Amino acid sequence: MQSRQKIGLILGPLLFLILYFFPMLTGLDDAPRAVLAVTAWVASWWVTEAIPIPATSLLPIFLLPITGGAEENTATMAYGDPIVFMYMGGFTIALAIEKWNLHKRIAMTIIAMIGTSSQQIILGVIISTALLSMWISNAATALMMLPIALALITEVKNNQFMDEASLNKFAKGLLLTVAYSASIGGLATLIGSVPNAVFAGVASSTLDQTVTFTDWFLFGFPITIVLLVFLYVYITRIQFKVTQKGNISDDFARNQLRQLGTMSFEEKAVLTIFSITGVLWISSGFLPEGLRLTDTSISIIGASAMFLLPSRQEKGNLMQWKDMKELPWGLLLLFGGGLSLAAAFEESGLTEWFGEILGSLEALPYVLLLIVLAAIVLFMTEIMSNTAMANMLIPISIGLALGIGIEPYSIMAVVALTASCAFMLPISTPPNAAVFSSDYLTIDDMVKAGFWMNIIAIIVIVGFVYFWQPVVLTP
């Protein structure tokens, strides 16, 4: 057990005991004080990973009722929130895409279409990675794209298309492109990044407002596009500009596609289900009310279809239950734990208390408040789980919004978006960790490149929250 874990193991219960048994410290009534104490314990163990994060996420189930912070129904029903099941359906579809190797065909097709100069390759990787990350977890996307990126680097090296210095820049830029695109692409959809779904879940449980897939897509997709444009210019023209003597063979991507062969029946079936599900998600807000199709029901329909259609390559259907062992069940528990605490915040009145404390920030100009909040969340996420950050801060951000007299979606959106945009350290996000596992990157490379991407992300996110969010995403 690491020192951080040992400290967290003691710190969590200690904070709980101090906050719970010394009411004079907060002046809170019993219920909100209990919720605050439980949150401190859970947050400490989330941050330090004193025990596995999914296991920590189960603590609210018994701590909240025992301490009087919330009723048992309140604490447990959050784990069955519709958003949790929407995520589960999305993960199942993603598993089917991975199982039948559809992700590699999509990536290679895009690279073959765009071209094979160094800049074109990076553009192709940006588009491929971001598109996949909209529907598949950023960690899975980065792990899928990493072998492709390494193969491209090897091709350049073997054919001596660049001198050594340029090759080094190209390798660093391409690998960081995979990591950053995976994080940025996830901003576009509710299932692309956990903080986005936390936003929707808390809006439903605490504000009694439904954020549909379409609502978030209209808000998040333009942010993704702008950040990807900045990423392309930054990587290819500023941070890792390269001198190239020739292009990678135009046949590279086509050779990869030839090795995959013609699309199998299974790939076509998975692509069809995936496409229909995506179209329904995007258009659900425009469907007649009589159809009663929600984002969750669409997700589960798509997942269920994977178990219904037969496979020709193996006995059974496209997906079998044994395949579900790869589903990130722990992430669903983590998500449920966050929603459980959020529900307890609302039921106990703790949200209003945070609002009163944070009301002193009302003196800051609105834009400056958003910038400061975005910077705090983003740089905290460099050393903390973005899911843990979202689970802790999105419920609190409602209190902040109420305290300063503004609508809560703006503060919630800043927290959700910036929690997914930590670019500086290998520990910041799973995509960063994935690309750092190669031999091409150093901590110094990531810090230098990631710092300016962090600044760009803050500016873009705050700008869109200030100008665009009130237009397309309002309570």
Image (spheres, rainbow, N blue to C red):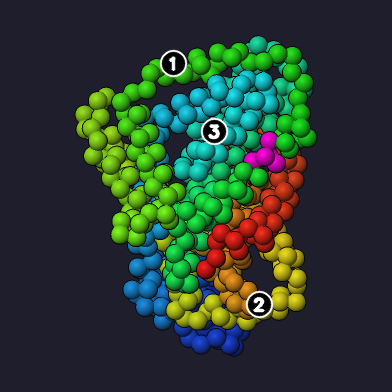
Q: Is residue 158 left or right of residue 137?
A: right
Q: Amino acid at mark 2?
A: Ile
Residue in the foreground of this view, choosing between 63 and 318: 318
| Rendered location of residue 137, percent (x, y) | 48, 44
Image disc number at residue 128: 3
Image disc number at residue 97: none
Number of callouts: 3
Q: Which residues are magenta?
A: 227-232
Q: Amino acid at mark 3?
A: Ser
Q: Secondary structure at mark 3?
A: helix
**Label 3, residues with CA under 10 Å away: few <14, some 14-19, many ≥20:** many
Tag 2 near tag 1, CB within 8 Å: no
Image disc number at residue 404: 2
**Label 1, residues with CA under 10 Å away: few <14, some 14-19, many ≥20:** few
| Rendered location of residue 266, percent (x, y) | 31, 29
Which residue does the image show at 52% across and 38% down from the upper left? 131
Which residue does the image show at 55% across and 36% down from the upper left? 129
Q: What is the chief secondary structure element of the magenta stretch? A: helix
Give how far apart the Cα atoms at labels 3 and 1 are.
19 Å
Mark 2 or mark 1: name the one nearer the start of the chain. Answer: 1
| Rendered location of residue 270, percent (x, y) | 35, 34
Question: Which residue bears the numbered disc 1?
Answer: 259
Above or below: residue 434 compared with residue 31: above
Q: Is residue 365 visible?
A: yes
Q: Amino acid at mark 1?
A: Gln
Q: Is residue 366 left or right of residue 143?
A: right
Q: Secondary structure at mark 2?
A: helix
Q: Is residue 327 visible?
A: no
